[in-house]
Image (cartoon, rainbow, N blue to C red):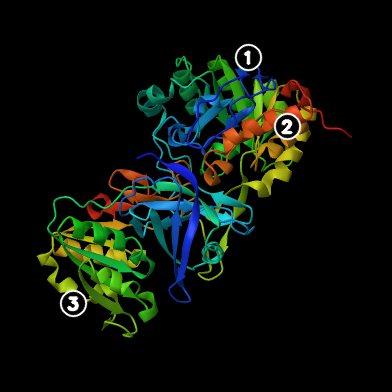
Amino acid sequence: MRLYRRACVQYKSTVMADLKVNIGKLELKNPVLTASGTFGYGVEFEDFIDIDALGGIIVKGTTLEHREGNPYPRMAETPSGMLNAVGLQNKGVDAFINDIYPKIKHYKTNVIVNVSGSKIEDYVAVVEKLNDLDNIPAIELNISCPNVKTGGMAFGTSCSSAQDVTKAVRNAYKKTLIVKLSPNVTSIADIAKAVEDAGADSISLINTLLGMAVDAETQRPVLSTITGGLSGPCVKPIALRMVWQVSKAVKIPLIGLGGIMNATDAIEFILAGASAVQVGTANFIDPAVSIKIVNGIDDYCNRHKIGSVNQLIGQLKF
Amino acid sequence: MKKYIHDLTIVSNRKLNSQYFILGLSDIAPLPEMLPGQFVEIKVENNSSVFLRRPISVHDVDREKNILYLLIKIVGNGTHSLSLVKQGEKLNLVYPLGNNFNTENVGNVILAGGGCGIAPMLYLARLLKQKNKKVSILLGGRTSSDILEIDEFEKYGSVYISTDDGSLGEKGFITKNTVLTRLKEYDRLYCCGPLPMLKVIAAVAKENNIDCEVSLENTMACGIGACLCCVTETIDGNKCVCTEGPVFNINQLSWQI
């Protein structure tokens, strides 16, 4: 039984089931993480939820150098989702370490940094700096961002480049290494296998799907970059399919994401083979949704008389 | 300022004309402090084509009656759904969001609202009047049905009007209203409206060397600085309109004016 501090919305005060899961050496108090790029650095959500009650947070994509990101407009609403073209706007790893880390290192949950880059050397330089931060127990290697001109998704769309960057980072980074895969590939299972062989501890999937929005009135693309990354419930069936396929191909634990809006969605990913999940775009609609999903998973376990959430991982019945 | 996520009760839905309506929202508990220029993000229920919340300016706050007023223009599916809500129903709000207009260090001010940009100006005008400032209000729109709440604005200052078609007030763009030729009389110009209007007004303010604050209406997703979708270019790089704005002093923006 665990007591949650009351935030501004009244949440369930106790959790009954054992929600602990492991991602390699990393222990999560429950399987709910927040997805990079949808949760800022956590501080943006402190008015709404108790960050410590989450399994972890994955902070904004961090690069070696400061990045201004793409020009406005960066967002288009779509049926059951949205396109974004933010382009990894961030102040760079040194600013993260000096300015942001001191504000978030007190969180009593796993703070995971999403690492992005254009060159293998950049990824390595970033993770070498992050290695020294005591309260960052893991990184998520982003080889799947569709919104940057060089690098990003290019690393995640061929087995050899995915393997090369994962290997290089593995050699430089001693703690838990999660690699985030792109769905914009022919066979995601092959990429997953390559990443596992290169030493990744875990795979998170999926990043956004490359998409596009057109304004018929102005006869122009909506996004400044023309194309962008699609997220939200519209991508969930694709994400579930990919989690299931990858779970058959690799032995390392998976973290599933793509359109999770509620606890039922999260359970679906866990049944399909994910050991944990990430909540992304849903944070924009309901800033308290991540905690509601934790509580909902507990309710589900109780309703189905399941003592530990681990008993659900990959237990899809056929 | 602390932000909240609350279900508020609709106490009124007043249709102004075919395009505009004003929602009154209340709660059992006292509403949190809200300042002129701030906005709320409303969840649109029962419309599967609307995925994101809709950002809406605070139009006015009645502290005695504990009512928040939102002036909304029907521009698409989301705002159309909101126009149909009924008294007694609830709407989920994330609020109050964003920064506010600076009401310090001024004596004589002018507020310019174009089209739906009129919305945040009423609360601002009322607050400035309470602070004993001399207030002028310039309202502009395509036609007379875009000029809203004139009686309300007249309580707080002198009202000037422009319509593109001349159906009310001076004929022509709001940016050509004769009150703007006397801009040097004022200490600050506050402005909200479509981007082209803001840029012209900002240029006029700069020519006259008077302080100018504009409220931007960039499309946004989260409203709390997490998604980084609503950015505008400033002299310090891209800034989120939802958290660093929506109000910016024109000197902060990297506009070529």
Tell me the CA gap for discs 3 and 2: 66 Å
Q: Which residue is mark 3?
A: B178
Crowd band around label 3 with a 10 angstrom C-alpha radius: few (<14), some (14–19), many (20+):
few
Closer to the N terminus: mark 1 or mark 2? 1
How many discs mark residues in the rendered view? 3
Pointer 3 indicates a residue of which chain?
Answer: B
Q: Secondary structure at mark 3?
A: helix
* B184 sits left or right of A223 in the view: left
Q: Which residue is mark 1?
A: A25
Q: Where, by quadrant of the figure, is residue A2 drawn? A: top right
Of the pair B88 and A142, the residue shown nearer to us: B88
Crowd band around label 1 with a 10 angstrom C-alpha radius: few (<14), some (14–19), many (20+):
few
Of the pair A306 and B110, the residue shown nearer to us: A306
Tell me the CA gap for discs 3 and 1: 71 Å
Q: Residue at x 47, y 39 (%)?
A: A88
- The disc label shown at residue A300, or none: 2
Whether labels 3 and 2 share one chain: no
Residue type, label 3? Thr
Any part of residue A195 in sight: yes
* A248 sits left or right of B252 in the view: right
Any part of residue A86 in sight: no
Pointer 2 indicates a residue of which chain?
Answer: A
Q: Secondary structure at mark 2?
A: helix
